[in-house]
Each structure stands twice: as C-alpha cells, then as structure tokens.
Image (tube, helix red, strand yellow):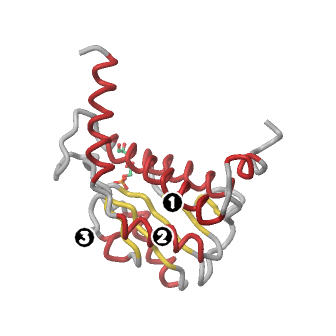
Amino acid sequence: MQTTQYLAEIREELHRTAEAVVSREAEELADAILNAGKIFAAGAGRSGLMMKAFAMRMMHLGFDAYVVGETVTPNLIKDDVFIVGSGSGETKSLVSMAEKAKNLGASVAAITIFPESALGRLSDIAVKLPGSPKDKSDNPYPTIQPMGSLFEQTLLLFCDAIILRLMEKKGYTSETMFGRHANLE
Ligand SMILES: O=C([C@H](O)CO)[C@H](O)[C@H](O)COP(=O)(O)O
C-alpha cells in the first residue's frame, strides 16, 4: 500500500474512534479542569507524550497546569486535579500516582480505553476512549496501526477538543493563547 493509502486508513480509524466518545464524560472533564486549583497531567511512554502536549496547551490557556515528574512541577494538594492518560489503565507507576493523588484529596480523572481498569476504578471521572491497547490483547477497535497508536492519536485529538471547549467557556481566542506562547525560542 502507498503511504497516502495508509494515511486514508488512519483517518478512517480516527473517524470511528472520535464518534464513540461520550459527550457527558468529556463535559465532566472540562468542568473539573475549569474548577481545579492546579492541574497535573501524567502518562507513560507514548501516551505520556500526548499528555505533555495537553498540559502545554492548558498552560497557554492560562491554567496552572503541570506535567508530573518535570523539574518545575510543584506539590499536589486537595482541590487539584490529577489527569492521567493510559490506554491499558494498568501502568503500575500511574496507578501508584493516582492512589497518592487521591489520598492527598485531589480529584483523579482517567482517560483510558478501559474504565474498568485499576486507573478507571480509582478515578472520579473516567473518559473512555476507543482504541487498541499496546499489547493488542483485548482489541475492541480493529486497527492496522502498531501497539497503542490509535489510542494515542485519539487521545491527542480528544485533548484538543477539550481545549476548544475550555477556550469557549473562558472566552479565549487563539490570540489570547498566543500571548502565553514561549518567546525565548
Ligand atoms: O509507550 C507506550 C507504548 O509504546 C504503546 O504504544 C505506552 O503509551 C506506554 O507503555 C504506557 O502504556 P499505557 O499506560 O497503557 O498507555
């Protein structure tokens, strides 16, 4: 197959996953972010890269948003929200972070393929995103892509949709966000 044919297939896969996202779950997440003190984004490996992009966009929107594990990330307290992106919902380091966040009184939100997973069960808000887990063990959404690619792409698109919703709720435009863009590049 030509590269452009693969691209067309990926677009079809994303069309299917985007359609399956539940609006109520997305709204719950958007409201939790709006009402939070600080926001902590976490994820491992490739899903973690998507969560970093999400935290950066929230910072551009003026939220007090951090990536867990980075040098300037402060402490988490009650009223903060811990948002984790995990396809499997079972990544051990993330489960342990979510438990700690909960014990500290923060809200926990999980964006995952499996709301019935350890992370899903721990969370106050669970957003189910269709996709295929990295080990392909339980594959409710067929994909030609390797490992967790479909989930990771859906995660990035979903987070960008949340950003648009937050822009709408705060009355922000691309220009206001650009005012917070790094200027020492
Ligand atoms: O990097 C990853 C792997 O290559 C999948 O494509 C995963 O994102 C990482 O291992 C974390 O897993 P999940 O918590 O199940 O998303």
- Which dot, 2 or 1, sits closer to the camera? 1
Residue 178 vs residue 148, the one in the foreground:
178
- Which is in the foreground here, disc 2 or disc 3? 3
Q: Answer few, some or many: residues within 10 Å of disc 1's Cα (few below 14, many 20 plus, some between 14 and 19).
A: many
Amino acid identity at mark 3:
Glu
Q: Are marks 2 and 1 in contact (CB under 8 Å)?
A: yes
Mark 3 crowdedness (10 Å alpha carbons): few <14, some 14-19, many ≥20: some
Q: Spatial distance from mark 1 to mark 3, Cα to Cα?
A: 19 Å
**Residue 122 location, quadrant:** bottom left
Which of 57/75 is in front? 57
Q: What whole-number distance in Å separates the C-alpha atoms at marks 2 and 3? A: 18 Å
Mark 2 / mark 3, whichever is N-terminal:
2
User: What residue type is disc 2 on?
Assistant: Met
Q: Is residue 39 left or right of residue 142?
A: right
Which image quadrant is residue 169 in?
bottom right
Q: Identify which residue is drawn at 45% across, 63% down.
A: 84
Residue occupied by mark 1: 42
Where is residue 76 shown, x and y percent of the image? 62, 75
Q: Residue at x 43, y 64 (%)?
A: 94
Query: Could you tell me if the residues under marks 2 and 3 are in contact, i.e. CB atoms within 8 Å?
Result: no
Q: Residue at x 64, y 72 (%)?
A: 38
Tag 1: residue type? Ala
Q: Earlier in the sequence, mark 2 or mark 1?
A: 1
The x and y percentages for residue 51 are: 51, 53
In the image, 157: left or right of 89? right
From the image, tell me which residue sits under label 2.
97
The residue wearing badge 3 is 116
Name the residue furthest top: 2
The picture places residue 118, in percent across and down from the top left corner, at 31, 71
